[in-house]
Image (tube, rainbow, N blue to C red):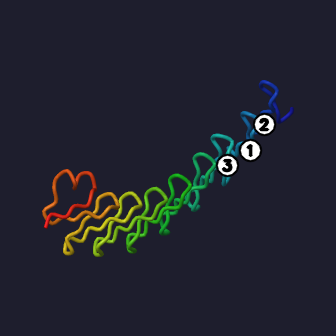
Amino acid sequence: MSNYRSFSGMPLLINTAGPYRSFSGTPLLTKPTAEYSSYSGSLILLPTRGPHYSFSGTPLLINTKGPYRSLSGTPLLLEQKGAYQSFSGTPLLINTKGPYKSMSGTPLLLQEKNGYRSFSGVPLLIKNPTTLSSLLGIPTLLN
């Protein structure tokens, strides 16, 4: 008996004893005990003991024991002990002890001692700022 079948001219590997199977001519690694698997023709590293995982063929670093994690193929720094964290591949300064913070990759000045604050990367003078200038991110001087 052959290990191959074909739907619409593409070979389909149906040998379940081996780690590979193909549904569209692209080999998919489907053996549960194997190290790799694929859902769209791209290899996906499955073992929970291993550090990598992928949902679309892009390797994602998901080792929670280490400082990095990735959900979109871009490594994200998750080390809480440091001053930086990233949720979209852009490092964000989240050290609340320091004067800066960023939620979108743009450092924001949060220290109010100097009279300035920024919500969009543009410093805003917050000594008696107008409501409109604070919402729009336009620096204002009201002295």
SS for callout 1: strand
Residue drawn at the location 82% of the way across and 26% of the way down: 9
Residue 45, given in percent of the width and then of the height, sits at: 62, 53
Residue drawn at the location 52% of the way across and 63% of the way down: 63
Return the residue at label 3: 43
Q: Quadrant of the N terminus?
A: top right
Residue drawn at the location 15% of the way across and 66% of the way down: 127
Amino acid type, label 3: Leu
Amino acid type, label 1: Tyr
Q: Is residue 7 left or right of residue 95?
A: right
Circles 2 and 1: CB atoms closer than 8 Å:
yes
The numbered mark at residue 13 is: 2
SS for callout 3: loop
Residue in front for this viewpoint, 137 or 18? 137
User: Could you tell me how far apart the alpha carbons at marks 1 and 3 are, in whole angstroms?
Assistant: 11 Å
**Which is nearer the N-term, disc 1 or disc 3?**
1
Tag in front: 1 or 3 = 3
Residue 136, given in percent of the width and then of the height, sits at: 27, 51
Q: Is residue 81 above or below residue 121?
A: below
SS for callout 2: strand
**Which is nearer the N-term, disc 2 or disc 1?**
2
Amino acid type, label 2: Leu
Return the residue at label 1: 20
Q: Is residue 96 above or below residue 86?
A: below
User: Could you tell me how far apart the alpha carbons at marks 2 and 1 are, in whole angstroms?
Assistant: 7 Å
Residue in front for this viewpoint, 125 or 14? 125
